[in-house]
């Protein structure tokens, strides 16, 4: 595996592969890699001749400076994991390399990007689209891999690709969880041992809500989740929304969709965690 920091070096390496007719997969990340990321990388390695993994804590998608400052950075360990997964390039650019001047482009995919994370992290998806579109332009991948843990992000990137006609395939990958159910997240590293136990209630509540939903209305299921989280000291619910998985609009009745998804964001102490779950129709 080659570790590259400049766009020029990355593109030189990619040109050599392209000249041999090789396909390229791209896995965009912000580093602090874990088994969730590894699942995306392994899938790309299996489906493409070469895999680029970008490691870049993208400042334009952070609306909270504290969150940006505290985001874990573990480049050496990340590169060891990527090597084991069979990645071809780890692309770890500086902020100046990616944004030599401010990116003034504005991306708007309303109503997909105005609800949930879009409402609580103003500008977040604009920043995500800025960096992801730059990566698509730089790498020109055949396929790009994103996790379903960031469910709304995946929907917005699919819409960006559709509208901007990027000639690539977006591959959504299932959420990887700890053995006890907690969704893997780089931000889990910031949890104390006690908080880690408390955070477990998030996935447990989602799993329980799927069983509950089988014999209750959407409104009752909403209340079940809200009450379950409120009953846990140390957790603060930011939102829980039951939405159509394609439109991301709230549903009022299970019959409104055959693809219902519950998206949740919870503060565990100071750490903001997200998760989601599908409901059977
Ligand atoms: N547990 C997981 N299962 C599957 N994919 C995941 C998981 N965690 C992250 N990903 C995916 O990895 C890619 C990079 O995500 P990112 O670097 O933000 O990691 P992260 O763990 O989601 O970090 P954080 O949630 O703290 O921002 C995204 O496409 C994301 O959806
Ligand atoms: C897609 C992404 C790498 C863009 O910075 C980020 O939003 C993430 O890690 O999900
Ligand atoms: N995984 C989404 C990146 C972020 O939280 O900014």
Image (cartoon, helix red, strand yellow):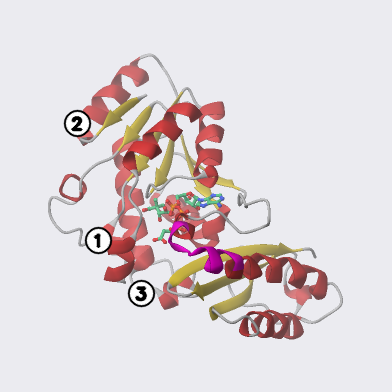
Side of 42 where 32 appears, left or right: left
Which quarter shows the C terminus? bottom right
| Secondary structure beneath label 2 | helix
Residue pointed to by mark 3: 122
Mark 1 against mark 3, which lies toward the viewer? 3
Whether residue 166 is visible, yes or no, is: no
> What's the magenta bit mostly, secondary-structure-wise?
helix
Residue pointed to by mark 2: 8
Mark 1 → mark 2, Cα distance in angstroms:
23 Å
Mark 1 → mark 3, Cα distance in angstroms:
15 Å
Highlighted range, magenta? 189-197
Q: Residue at x 24, y 24 (%)?
A: 12
Mark 1 against mark 2, which lies toward the viewer? 2
Q: Is-magenta flag for residue 192?
A: yes
Q: Residue 66: x percent and y percent?
A: 29, 70
- Cβ(mark 1) to ligand 2 < 8 Å? no
* Viewer-proximal residue among 29 and 151: 29
Residue pointed to by mark 1: 105
Q: Is-magenta flag for residue 102?
A: no
User: On screen, 250 above or below 171?
Assistant: below
* Viewer-proximal residue among 43 and 167: 43
């Amino acid at each position: 595996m080659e570790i590259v920091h400049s766009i020029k070096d990355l593109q030189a390496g990619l040109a050599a592969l392209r000249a041999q007719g090789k396909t390229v997969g791209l896995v965009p990340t912000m580093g602090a890699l874990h088994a969730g990321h590894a699942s995306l990388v392994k899938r790309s390695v299996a489906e493409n001749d070469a895999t680029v993994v970008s490691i870049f804590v993208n400042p334009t998608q952070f609306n909270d400076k504290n969150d940006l400052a505290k985001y874990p950075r573990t480049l050496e360990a990340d590169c060891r994991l990527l090597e084991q997964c069979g990645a071809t390039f780890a692309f770890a650019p500086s902020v100046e390399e990616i944004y030599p001047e401010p990116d003034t482009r504005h991306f708007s995919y309303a109503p997909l990007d105005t609800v949930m994370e879009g409402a609580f992290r103003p500008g977040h998806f604009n920043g995500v689209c800025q960096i992801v579109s730059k990566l698509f332009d730089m790498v020109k991948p055949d396929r790009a891999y994103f996790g379903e843990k960031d469910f709304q992000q995946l929907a917005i990137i699919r819409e960006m690709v559709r509208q901007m006609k990027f000639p690539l395939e977006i591959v959504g990958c299932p959420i990887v969880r700890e053995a006890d159910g907690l969704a893997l997240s780089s931000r889990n590293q910031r949890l104390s041992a006690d908080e880690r136990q408390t955070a477990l209630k998030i996935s447990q509540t989602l799993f329980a809500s799927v069983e509950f939903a089988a014999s209750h209305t959407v409104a009752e299921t909403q209340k079940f989740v809200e009450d379950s989280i409120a009953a846990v000291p140390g957790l603060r619910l930011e939102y829980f929304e039951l939405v159509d998985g394609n439109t991301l609009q709230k549903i009022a009745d299970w019959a409104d969709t055959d693809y219902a998804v519950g998206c949740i964001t919870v503060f565990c102490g100071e750490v903001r965690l997200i998760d989601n779950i599908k409901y059977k129709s």
